[in-house]
Amino acid sequence: MTAFDVINPATGDVVESVALTSLEETDAAIAAAQAAFAGWRAVAPGDRARLLRRFADAVDADRENLAQLEVRNAGHTIGNARWEAGNVRDVLHYYAAAPERLSGRQIPVPGGVNITFHEPLGVVGVIVPWNFPMPIAGWGFAPALAAGNTVVLKPAELTPLTAVRLGELAREAGLPDGVFTVLPGKGSVVGNRFVTHPLVRKVVFTGSTDVGKQIMAGCAAQVKRVTLELGGKNANIVFADSDLERAAATAPYGVFDNAGQDCCASSRILVQDSVYDRFMELLEPAVKGVVVGDPASEQTEMGPLISAHHLRSVSSYVPADAPVAFRGSAPEGPGFWFPPTVVTPTAPDDPLITDEVFGPVVAVVRFTDEADAIRMANSTEYGLSGSIWTNDLGRALRVSRAVEAGNLSVNSHSSVRYWTPFGGFKQSGLGRELGPDAVAAFTEVKNVFLSTQE
């Protein structure tokens, strides 16, 4: 197969056909990136920053086009897609400040002067998932480019269109040839070659934990650097002392955003037993009020699932005898639609509680006290994000420190901000993206001692 039909998940129609990059073409692109590396790392910091700002401005000028592409390709709501394109712009602007601030240290030592440098790695391979094609691409390539690396990027086979356009915008902004190259293709070809090619010095991967483990094992053969952002089975913990009305009203948007296809989705809601019934009364109208429909409509809050295959996967978790408490609505007919669904499993090993469904399905479970909530939140192999709802500041801090997750919000469902580090505990990943330290993850520290002895 030399091309892939990109499908609109809201209609099932073919949007366009995209050529798949071959192994030989992948090798040629990696060689070109390596050839461009020496020149890119030598660009003066201020000039590299200026080029990244020009790239950001090009993204901003094309923001509506990028958003419309994502609506058709990934089924994202137009509001979300505009935010996502804006996030690429903002992340580029944020890391455009890094080249002029990527300083080493002078460390006091006897007999001379000791200084450190942050040296770029070389060629960085970025493998992007289908659930958030634009922002996750930017989280990888922006800090990597800022640090002086060149980047080869593989978008997900299902959602290549915005990545291809970002590659075009980079060239239009003046980034030299070979510095940022987008390679649509199969994971078994392009992605695997990032892992095995000796000139690729680091792989950044976002996706499933199973594939992440394979990439980590493959990179071990060359002691290749990796950053992994993997799965999540995140807990939204609602204590009896919280603002219950607000917690219930916002809960659907903590899990049904992007149709639940989000590693940060709070797909387990743990509710203190004394307020469980009242919470469910409040949650039902909030769930049924989620507007599911045409992602191009300004009023739509949730779109379709990404593919027919994924629809079958999500549906398998909710058979006819599943403990469904209530559901929202979804369109019938063409497209890959699944309604917002609330389930109430009781067995702790129920797949609805343990598995990352990756769809608009949320399990609501009772807990007794603070210790019980922490135990339940941590009873998973994942540790990516979560929310804590309480009006007790002491409890908020205690529970935040006790929950084994990398990104927690109190009285909020906001997991990701580009100013702050993002990543997971346990099998949710390795390393951190975003925030002030992300650029350093794309460098090696070099130590140099200059003797002052006569």
Image (cartoon, grey):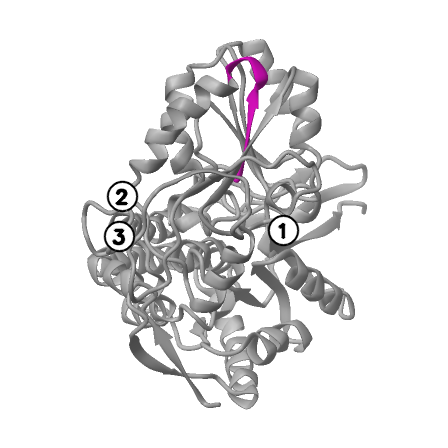
Q: Which mark is residue 293?
A: 3
Q: Residue at x 36, y 62 (%)?
A: 74
Image: 268 above or below 258: above
Q: CA distance from mark 2 to mark 3?
A: 7 Å
User: Disc 2 designates what residue?
Assistant: 291
Query: What amino acid type is highlighted by mark number 2?
Result: Val
* Residue 259 location (% of width, % of height): 40, 50
**Left or right relative to 368: residue 9:** left
Label 1, label 2: how far apart the Cα atoms are: 52 Å
Q: Nearer the viewer, mark 1 or mark 3?
A: 3
**In the picture shown, does residue 281 fall above or below 100?**
above
Residue 415 has which mark? none
Q: Residue at x 30, y 79 (%)?
A: 16
Q: Is residue 430 visible?
A: no
Q: Residues within 10 Å of mark 3 (few under 14, many from 20)?
A: many
Q: Which residue is mark 1?
A: 117
Q: Quadrant of residue 50?
A: bottom left
Question: Would you say residue 177 is visible in this rendering?
Answer: yes
Pick whichever, 313 or 209, lies toward us: 313
Magenta span covers which residues?
Answer: 267-275
